Amino acid sequence: SMAGGLEPHLEALRREMAAPGPAVFSVLLALLVVVITFLIWRFVQGRRSSRKAVLLLGLCDAGKTLLFARLLTGRYRDTQTSITDSSAVYRARNDKGANVTLIDLPGHESLRLQFLERFKAAARAIVFVVDSVAFQREVKDVAEFLYQVLVDSTVLKNAPALLIACNKQDVTMAKSAKLIQQQLEKELNTLRVTRSAAPTSLDGSATGGPAQLGKKGKDFDFSQLPMKVEFVECSARGSKGEEGDADLEGLEKWLAKIA
């Protein structure tokens, strides 16, 4: 008799589950949205955390290798033009004590793009090192390399944080970060106008038409890029030369922020 008394209630419950009312449907929909949002967040975080490399890029003699050594050991060392990459774990100076992998890439024209191709997918951030003393003479070459980095399809998609490190500020003739930014924006604007052919990514595949650097119809500036771009002045050599400390405070703060 008890089973018979429960039967109508069980039947009503089955009907409710088979044809849920608006309230049940709303709850299920809300749960679905939460689950999907969580999965997307985990996917994005997973991809970001899998990118642990900070690439040091720049022309030959910009000071990348000395910068690399100073960040890791604090000590000065004589360097020569790199023909291969160097990598080491760097512990950021932040509360988390997070680690990133610093990778110093060759700056020689015949090598730099093939090494960037090898490591670009792992880049959480890029430090583009500029020789502030030779900048006026090298501005076209600096802008050319930076342009090739910025229109690469993988770099555009992953949008790693970008720091332009204006090195050799210990020398009196060094150009300021502000002037370097203005000159680079001007040169990059000229380059995007003159590049009428569709650029290709570093692996040689077409990007599906001309990559638009910045906003169409407006003069280029760095704020138009998908990644956050910052400038710092630094000196890997330091104002006291080999005997003194490097001046890398701005760079170290930036590394602590992105780690």
Image (spheres, helix red, strand yellow):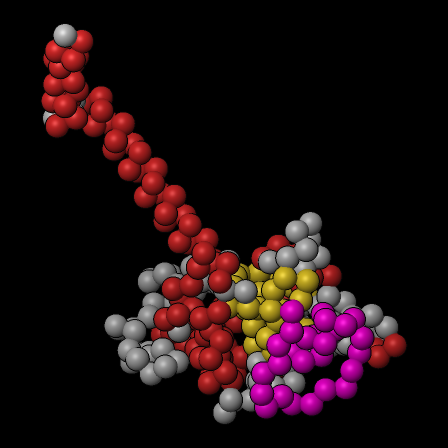
The percent coordinates of residue 29 (x first, y second) are 25, 33
Q: Is residue 169 visible?
A: no
Look at the image and say whether residue 70 sits in the magenta stretch.
yes
Q: Nearer the viewer, residue 181 or 110?
A: 110
Looking at the image, residue 131 lies above or below residue 47: below
From the viewer's perspective, tell me whether residue 184 is left or right of residue 35.
Answer: right
Looking at the image, residue 131 lies above or below residue 219: below
The percent coordinates of residue 5 (x first, y second) are 15, 8
Looking at the image, residue 185 lies above or below residue 34: below
Q: Nearer the viewer, residue 216 or 226?
A: 226
The percent coordinates of residue 62 (x first, y second) are 64, 81
Picture residue at 39% right of the left edge, 80% below the top: 202
Q: Is residue 210 visible?
A: yes
The percent coordinates of residue 37 (x first, y second) are 35, 43
Picture residue at 69% right of the left edge, 49% below the top: 95
Image quarter of the N terminus: top left
Which residue is most to the right? 243
From the viewer's perspective, tell me whether residue 11 is left or right of residue 219.
Answer: left
Q: Nearer the viewer, residue 15 or 249?
A: 15
Picture residue at 16% right of the left edge, 26% below the top: 17
Image quarter of the C terminus: bottom right
The number of numbered badges drawn on the structure is 0
From the viewer's perspective, tell me whether residue 30 is left or right of residue 243.
Answer: left
From the viewer's perspective, tell me whether residue 46 is left or right of residue 22.
Answer: right
Which residue is most to the front? 1
Q: Quadrant of residue 80?
A: bottom right
Picture residue at 68% right of the left edge, 62% below the top: 91
Look at the image and say whether residue 192 sits in the magenta stretch.
no
Looking at the image, residue 115 lies above or below residue 99: below
Extent of the magenta region? 64-89
